[in-house]
């Protein structure tokens, strides 16, 4: 496997009184497509800049393949960056931008020609080699930035929100392309984004960050299905998040008493003791909505009656906000499948039944 | 190509009238007078006699003139080079500083004092009984006062001091527009600190460097007051020669001919430079500094 593993150990960084990174530790594996995901201002760029060597951490260390690189300047690290604003050299042609690191190494002209051609081909820009960056579209600039970074054959490629300046369609396309470049090159990618869709769709693993801290590290499935904190649950996808008290525990199934509402069965791998205050979540698409009361209320199935407050139709799916008699509002997403599956239309003010399995509902945080 | 409505010849001429008037009265007419005078015979007490002759140009061909020209070129190149070497880091520092307004103020403050008074201030500092010598003698670093003034070094020092703001300002405004993340990109790709400056910063601020060069080289080439007040015989410059021909030898045609030579040399130099850097100056690189469109305005401006 090419690429390096990157270990970030207890890294801290403040700007004045402001703690941009507070004891961040992340282990990234060789060849992994690893994402740093979090809202704007949470410290993603700062962490990336520390890995690249543009900022020095106040505490902790950055290890590349087990070697502490903290004291090394950026030009001595086997790491290259695709910058948020591309940072292409405006005075150089596309060819010379890509050739930049080879020229610094005083590579022979024939090698430069061959390698630049190879990497321009990788990003499909052969035809634009002679152009200046100002003559390129956003997506093309992006590709030049990628080729320029990759031609140096880094063992880790850092990408800082590389797609944020592109429009939605192009973003999707470039994301797929990035993924395929990653597969071809095989080095470690550390990808910074605030877009949870992007992170979920390409990453091997994701670190979710907020306010200078890493909240959870896991595969997209783990992050989505079993968020570690309320913040992760709310930040990734759409969710229903409530507080409740633990009423009883049997194995991994926990009965929660939800304020002014009744009992809900949920799952917890490590059930908290009876009487604990917890937050719990159920994803809207895991909730079934129907006009009739679900028959044979199997053990572990929660059934809740309510009234549709607001239906939102969006083509392939509909979203419903359903208000229960106690005032609790649940978000429900119903996919529109084929004829066999589509029941009668559900409309505003309809009385409906919601049901979900205890296996799909999780305890997120234990409050006390 | 579409014609903009109302841009007919007559109206175009009308709009251009003020600048044509300005150029004719304050630039072309004086220039024509200088050209004419350079081909006439000197009058007995200054002025000219209307007898055409090439005497002035013959006089230029003598070795004294060549020596003074050479000295002027050396001083101008040296002082400009030193000025730029100081101005580029200063402009860089200002552009990166968080206290830009304060620093700009500091650059402007010297202009509140008259140029000549500032030269006399240097004399007060560097003179034989000046401030610097007082310190050297008091601390015992020197046994007798050191002669700092009246040589080429003093002329260069005061010229650099005088024209530094004119070099810093255009450099600052160009560097301020420079995207500093490009330097990080260069470091990221393996360039050293100095390599990043050479390969990325300098090529991108070419326009500012050229402007700063023109703003210093042209006035220094025509310098008059500085070599007069702090220079010695070996630092005599063309500006002094012109003044002496006018006021002491009363040879106006010769003074005119020398002026024309300065004008010609600087104009040709400027045109060559503009041409070589066409891209950077004429905005070809996108956000290059606008061209110094009236290089002639500064020409012959001996101070
Ligand atoms: N050089 C700096 N000086 C002061 N504050 C900074 C600096 N760089 C970043 N910050 C602050 O640190 C926080 C994290 O910034 P950043 O890492 O860029 O966030 P992100 O990339 O996640 O949006 C932000 O609040 C930002 O204002
Ligand atoms: Mg950022």
Image: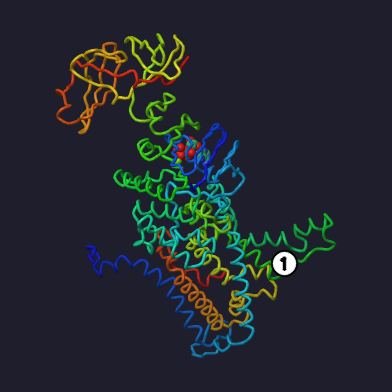
State whether residue B275 is above or below residue B63: above
Relative to A275, B77 lies left or right: right
| Image coords of residue A38 (percent x, y) | 43, 34
* Looking at the image, residue B2 lies above or below residue A46: below
Q: Nearer the viewer, residue A251 or B139?
A: A251
What colouring style does the render use? rainbow
Q: x and y percent of residue B136 in the render? A: 80, 58
Of all chains, the one bearing label 1 is: B
Position in image of residue A170 (x %, y %): 31, 47
Q: Residues within 10 Å of mark 1 (few under 14, many from 20)?
A: some
Q: Residue at x 49, y 43 (%)?
A: A30
Determine if the C-beta at disc 1 is less than 8 A from ligand 1: no
Left or right of A279: which side holds B58?
Answer: right
Residue nearest the viewer, comparing A131 with A279: A279
Q: Position of residue B60 (x, y in %)?
A: 58, 85
Regarding residue A315, the answer to whether it shows in the image is yes
Q: Nearer the viewer, residue B258 or A44?
A: A44
The answer to which quarter of the image holds residue B288 is bottom left
Q: Residue at x 54, y 34 (%)?
A: A25
Question: Seen in the image, is B199 located left or right of residue B126?
Answer: left
Q: Which residue is identified by label 1? A: B149
Residue for point 36% across, 61% down: A126
Q: Secondary structure at mark 1?
A: loop
Q: Is residue B266 above or below residue B120?
A: below
Is residue A37 toward the left or the right of residue B132 in the image?
left
Which residue is painted at 41% across and 70% down in the image? B23
Count numbered badges in the picture. 1
Q: Nearer the viewer, residue B62 or A122?
A: A122
Q: Is residue B289 visible?
A: no
């Amino acid at each position: 496997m090419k690429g390096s593993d990157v270990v970030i150990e207890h890294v801290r960084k403040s700007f004045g009184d402001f703690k941009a990174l507070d004891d961040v530790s992340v282990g990234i594996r060789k060849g992994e497509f690893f994402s740093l995901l979090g809202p704007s201002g949470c410290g993603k760029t700062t962490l990336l800049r520390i890995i690249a060597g543009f900022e020095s951490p106040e505490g902790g260390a950055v290890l590349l393949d087990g070697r502490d690189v903290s004291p090394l300047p950026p030009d001595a690290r086997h790491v290259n960056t695709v910058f948020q604003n591309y940072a292409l050299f405006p005075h150089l042609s596309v060819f010379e931008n890509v050739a930049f690191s080879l020229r610094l190494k005083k590579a022979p002209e024939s090698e430069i020609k061959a390698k630049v051609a190879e990497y321009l081909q990788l990003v499909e820009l052969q035809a634009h080699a002679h152009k200046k960056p100002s003559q390129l579209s956003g997506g093309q600039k992006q590709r030049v930035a990628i080729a320029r970074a990759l031609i140096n054959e880094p063992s880790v490629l850092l990408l800082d929100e590389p797609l944020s300046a592109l429009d939605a369609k192009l973003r999707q396309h470039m994301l797929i392309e990035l993924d395929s470049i990653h597969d071809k090159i095989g080095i470690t990618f550390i990808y910074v984004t605030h877009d949870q869709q992007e992170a979920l769709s390409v990453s091997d693993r994701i670190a979710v960050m907020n306010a200078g801290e890493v909240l959870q590290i896991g595969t997209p499935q783990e992050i989505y299905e079993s968020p570690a904190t309320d913040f992760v649950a709310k930040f990734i996808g759409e969710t229903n998040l409530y507080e409740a008290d633990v009423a009883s525990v049997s194995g991994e199934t926990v009965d929660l008493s939800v304020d002014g509402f009744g009992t809900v069965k949920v799952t917890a791998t490590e059930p908290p003791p009876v009487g604990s205050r917890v937050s719990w979540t159920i994803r809207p698409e895991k909730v079934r909505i129907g006009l009739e009361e679900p028959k044979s209320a199997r053990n572990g199935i929660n059934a809740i009656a309510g009234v549709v407050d607001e239906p939102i139709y969006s083509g392939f799916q509909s979203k419903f906000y359903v208000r229960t008699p106690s005032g609790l509002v649940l978000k429900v997403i119903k996919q529109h499948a084929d004829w066999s599956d589509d029941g009668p239309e559900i409309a505003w003010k309809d009385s409906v039944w919601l049901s979900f399995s205890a296996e799909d509902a999780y305890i997120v945080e234990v409050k006390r | 190509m579409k014609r903009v409505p109302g841009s007919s010849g007559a109206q175009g001429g009308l709009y251009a009238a003020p600048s044509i008037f300005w150029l004719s009265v304050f630039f072309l007419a004086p220039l024509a007078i200088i050209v004419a005078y350079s081909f006439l015979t000197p009058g007995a007490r200054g002025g000219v006699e209307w007898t055409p002759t090439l005497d002035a140009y013959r006089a230029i061909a003598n070795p004294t003139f060549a020596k003074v020209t050479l000295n002027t070129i050396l001083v101008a190149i040296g002082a400009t080079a030193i000025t730029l070497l100081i101005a580029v880091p200063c402009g860089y520092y200002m552009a990166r500083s968080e206290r830009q307004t304060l620093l700009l103020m500091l650059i402007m403050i010297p202009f509140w004092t008259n140029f000549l008074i500032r030269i006399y201030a240097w004399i007060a500092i560097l003179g034989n009984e000046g401030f610097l010598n007082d310190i050297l003698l008091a601390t015992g670093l020197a046994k007798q006062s050191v002669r700092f003034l009246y040589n080429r070094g003093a002329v260069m020092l005061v010229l650099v001091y005088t024209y530094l703001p004119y070099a810093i300002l255009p450099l600052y405004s160009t560097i301020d527009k420079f995207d500093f993340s490009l330097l990080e990109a260069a470091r990221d790709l393996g360039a050293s600190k100095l390599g990043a400056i050479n390969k990325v910063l300098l090529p991108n601020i070419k326009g500012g460097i050229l402007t700063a060069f023109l703003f210093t080289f042209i006035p220094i080439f025509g310098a008059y007051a500085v070599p007069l007040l702090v220079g010695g015989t070996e630092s005599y410059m063309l500006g002094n020669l012109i003044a002496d021909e006018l006021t002491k030898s009363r040879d106006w045609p010769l003074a005119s001919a020398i002026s024309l030579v300065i004008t010609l040399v600087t104009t040709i130099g400027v045109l060559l430079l503009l041409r070589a850097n066409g891209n950077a100056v004429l905005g070809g690189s996108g956000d290059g500094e606008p061209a110094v469109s009236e290089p002639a305005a500064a020409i012959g401006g001996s101070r």
